[in-house]
Every structure is written in C-alpha cells, then in structure tokens.
Image (spheres, rainbow, N blue to C red):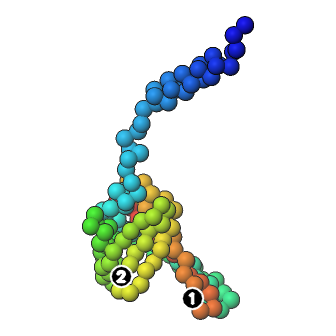
Amino acid sequence: MKNPIPWALACCATMFVLLTSSCSKNDSSNISTGDIVAGEWKFQQVDYHYYYDGRFYDTTSQFPDGGKYIQFKSDSSVYTNTDSLYTGKWAHNRDKLILTGGGYSSVFQIRALTESELVLYIKDDVIDGYSESVWHLKR
C-alpha cells in the first residue's frame, strides 16, 4: 500500500495555490494614508479638554461656515487658515500625523480617516496638568 501522506500534502498544496490565486486584490488597498490626508480640510469642530491645578475644563469651538481650514500639500508642506496663519511641514507614520514648523513639532493620533472625514487627537503635558484636543475636519 502506498503512503497517503505525499498525496495529502499535494492536495493541500494544490488547494492553497487555487485559493490564493483566485483572490483578487482591491485597487484601493494601494492608496496610502498620505494620499488620503493630502488636500484641504475644513474645521468643523475642535473639542478642548484641560486639566490644570486639580480642575477639569472643557470647551468646544464650532466652525459651521467652514472658513477655517488646514491644507496638507503633496510636497509635505502644510498651511492653516485659522485664528493665526501657520506654515510648516507634515508627515505621517501609520496612525500618526506629525506637524513641524517654527521650531516645534506636534504629533497627532489619527482617530478617523476617510475620503471626507479626518479626526485628529493630541495630548500635551503642561505644568500642573495636561491639555487634549480633538480636531474634527471635513473635505
């Protein structure tokens, strides 16, 4: 009687090749985070949370007219039109968005990212506490 193990291995190998070669790749999987981030985003809302000197403070700023925006350009430059103008550089690393300029660097966590929505979170330690902000942006 012949050994059934080589036959079983051959069948498993054939099934593996058939299953993996029949799967099609989605073209959108080639789109990087940077490709989605690049462009102009309008501020919708910014939530601020502060803890200072043993007390919590919360405030929200809303921008219903969309007049405040941040623009991530494909050459890695960034420009904001908010209460103050800011220019600098931007980069991304997985779920992080890094803004640098004017001798400062800020690292935001990307909480949500679609073609039309971007939500960024940052936490900074300050003397006797910390501050957090969540930026809600739309295209």
| Percent of width and height locating residue 25 | 42, 36
**Left or right of 9, for residue 39:** left
Work out whether residue 28 or residue 113 is closer to the camera in this orientation and state it: 28
CA distance separating discs 1 and 2: 20 Å
For the point 46% across and 28% down, the residue is 21
Quarter residue 128 falls in: bottom right
Is 21 above or below relative to 90?
A: above
Q: Quadrant of the N terminus?
A: top right
Q: Amino acid at mark 2?
A: Gly
| SS at badge 2 | strand
- Give the amino acid type for the residue marked by disc 1 in the picture: Val
Place of residue 100 in the rendered image (x, y in percent of width and height, measured from the top left): 38, 78
Q: Say which residue label 2 marks.
A: 101
Q: Position of residue 39 (x, y in %)?
A: 30, 62
Residue under numbered circle 1: 126
Specify whether 132 is left or right of 62.
right
**15 versus 130 height, above or below:** above
Hey, which quadrant is residue 136 in on the image? bottom left
At 34% from the left and 56% from the top, the residue drawn is: 35
Crowd band around label 1 with a 10 angstrom C-alpha radius: few (<14), some (14–19), many (20+): few
Q: Quadrant of residue 92?
A: bottom left
The image shows residue 107 at horizontal and vertical percentages of 47, 74
Q: Secondary structure at mark 1?
A: strand
Residue at 37 percent across and 41 percent down: it is 27
Label 2 crowd bin: few (<14), some (14–19), many (20+), radius 10 Å: some
Could you tell me if residue 22 is visible in this image? Answer: yes
* Outermost residue toward the top in this view: 1
- Residues tagged 1 and 2 counted as in contact (Cβ below 8 A): no
